[in-house]
Amino acid sequence: MTDLDVRAATPVDFDFLVDMLVEAVNWLPERNWSREQILANPALAHYVAGWMQPTDFGLLAVDEAGRPVGAAWFRYLTAADPGYGYVSDDVPELTIGVVENWRGRGVGRALLRAVLDAARARGISTVSLSVERANFAARLYAAEGFRTVESFEDADTMVRTLP
Ligand SMILES: CC(C)(COP(=O)(O)OP(=O)(O)OC[C@H]1O[C@@H](n2cnc3c(N)ncnc32)[C@H](O)[C@@H]1OP(=O)(O)O)[C@@H](O)C(=O)NCCC(=O)NCCS
């Protein structure tokens, strides 16, 4: 990732994480959910609501001016309020997004690898995510060691073990 740094996400990054959640939801060009719609939808808003909780962690890729260009973060959701990629209460779920004009340049893969390293460093042994099968991101995840553990109509739940 030339000219880019990676730094830990902090509480002040809430707005940018919302931006990236909006990108993750709207990965389909014909889908155009507004920020307000997404934040009003509990099944989506819970990926960022109240950021940052004590068990939340994530990374931002930033350009040479310190502007964020991508983020990858983990949050623990529970059986009472499960994420789309819920596996169990002790498996955090990943959200990842890269600003549109930075995509396809290796930022996403680098962020993914770095946030998996951060999870491993915390002693986490398994992480999960949900991806709509038609999203090329599913191939990125598979190439980075995620495997599908549950399939729904359009989406797969994938997990990655961290040896
Ligand atoms: C998914 C996303 C995070 C990947 O980040 P990125 O910086 O674009 O990805 P990278 O440049 O690291 O590329 C990763 C791989 O995907 C491939 N890829 C990138 N853009 C692609 C595209 N538009 N179509 C198909 N493959 C693509 C790359 O070729 C690369 O594979 P390769 O190294 O084997 O060539 C980013 O594209 C994004 O934010 N998309 C919208 C939000 C989203 O879908 N989030 C995930 C929801 S589950």
Image (cartoon, rainbow, N blue to C red):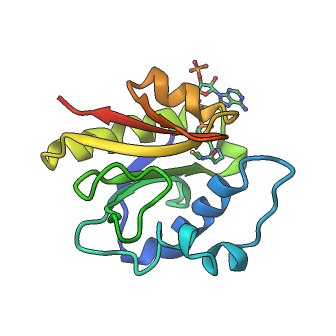
In the rendered image, residue 68, in percent from the top left (x then y), is placed at: 53, 59
Q: Residue at x 45, y 60 (%)?
A: 83
Instruction: Count the marks.
Output: 0
Work out which residue is located at the far right of the displayed protein and give it: 30
Which image quadrant shows ligand 1? top right
**120 left or right of 44 in image:** left
Q: Residue at x 23, y 73 (%)?
A: 54
**Which is nearer the eye, 109 or 156?**
156
Residue at the image point whose x is 51% and y is 45% from the top:
130
Choose top left, top right, bottom left or bottom right for residue 114.
top left
107 relative to 29 in the view: left or right:
left
**Relative to the observer, which residue lies in front, 134 or 65?**
134
Residue 117, x across and y down, in percent = 26, 39
Give the x, y percent position of residue 150: 46, 37
- Give the answer, above or below, for where 66 lies relative to 153: below
Depth check, front residue: 3 or 51: 51
- Whole-percent x, y for residue 43 in the image: 55, 69
The answer to whether any part of residue 115 appears in the image is yes
From the image, which quarter does the C terminus lie in? Answer: top left
Instruction: Let me know if residue 61 appears in the view.
Output: no
User: Which residue is outermost to the top?
Assistant: 143
In-image side of 96 versus 55 (left or right) = right
67 vs 128, left or right, is: right
State which quadrant residue 127 falls in. Answer: top left
> In this rendering, is residue 49 above or below 154?
below
Relative to residue 139, is residue 86 depicted above or below?
A: below
